[in-house]
Image (cartoon, rainbow, N blue to C red):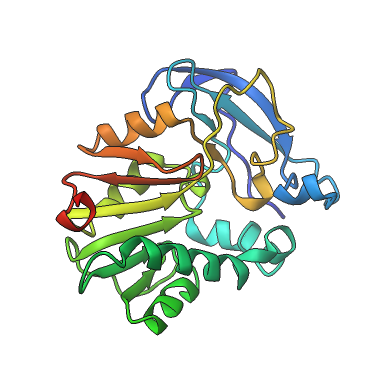
Amino acid sequence: MLKRLHFAGPQTSCKICKGPAPLYGVADFNKNCLEREKVFLPLLGEPVYYHQCESCRLIFSTAFDDWSAADFKAHIYNDDYVTVDPEYVEIRPRKLAGMVFNFIKRGTNLKLLDYGGGEGKTAALLREKGIAATSWDPMAAAALPRESAFDVVTCFEVFEHTPQPVVTAEDALRFLKPQGVLLFSTLTAEGMPPRHMDFWYIAPRNGHITIYSKAALKVLFESLGCTVHHFNDNVHMAYRQLPAWLAT
């Protein structure tokens, strides 16, 4: 049985800027990213409500705010997860490893942490390329890496999954050296029309519960003393001090 989903009511506060965030819309728990490819799961009859901040335009749900890691593993990141995200096993790690290698090849002897790296495939592929890469996932009971130890922290397809965006960003940043960079991916949604719940990226069954605008990411990382740079709508970088190997 699905764990109870929290409903904050018709109005709540933004999880990033604390601005007013009225209801945006509702989706069935089984709405997934592959519906745009005609992959439809049976409706579960469990409503997941989303709000949108009137200021920074963050779209988010409070439905999972009291869930534990065990709850997420049982109901979202379970054996059936591959049904709604088949690329996460092999295809995506290979694409990401190639992108990361091209990003950091200008540096020398860089240490990398793949934060939220799941089973560690991306980090393993980078090690094959000679990169000192470690994987760590907050959902797993693995030994905690040393703080302030890494030149690069990657954080791919993580931020849309967290019910606590500020806590997650702060947690990922603590592993960086002072001149380290956080390279992360999450699809930003700009100019979303009212009640646009058909948007494919809003997908509770995939764990997509926090959808960002570029403005929301700016507010989020500035609150933590960082500058954020957008390579495109999906790939971004945050840093406190730009390292020399990227500044040249």
* Residue in the image at 23% along x and 38% along y: 224
For residue 160, above or below residue 103: above
Residue 14 image-quadrant placement: top left
Quadrant of the snapshot with the N terminus = bottom right
Quadrant hosting residue 20: top left
Q: Is residue 47 visible?
A: yes
Q: For this view, does 145 lie left or right of residue 20?
A: left
Residue 189 place in picture, x, y as percent: 56, 32
- Residue 15 visible here: no
105 lies above or below 63: below
- Can you give x and y, in whole percent of width and height, for residue 175 in the image? 23, 59
Depth order, front residue of 77/151 = 151
Q: Within the image, what quadrant is residue 198 found in?
A: top right
Answer with left or right where residue 223 lies relative to residue 168: left
Q: Residue at x 54, y 65 (%)?
A: 95
Q: Nearer the viewer, residue 77 or 155?
A: 155
Is residue 164 depicted above or below 245 in this figure?
above
Which percent across, then down, holds residue 12?
49, 21
Q: How far across and down, in percent of the image, does residue 222 sit?
A: 26, 32
Furthest residue to the front?
Answer: 248
The residue that appears at 67% across and 60% down in the rendered structure is 85
How many labels sit on residues? 0
| Horizontal arrangement in the rendering, residue 79 relative to residue 226 (left or right) | right
Q: Residue at x 60, y 20 (%)?
A: 23
Lateral position of residue 55 relative to residue 144, left or right: right
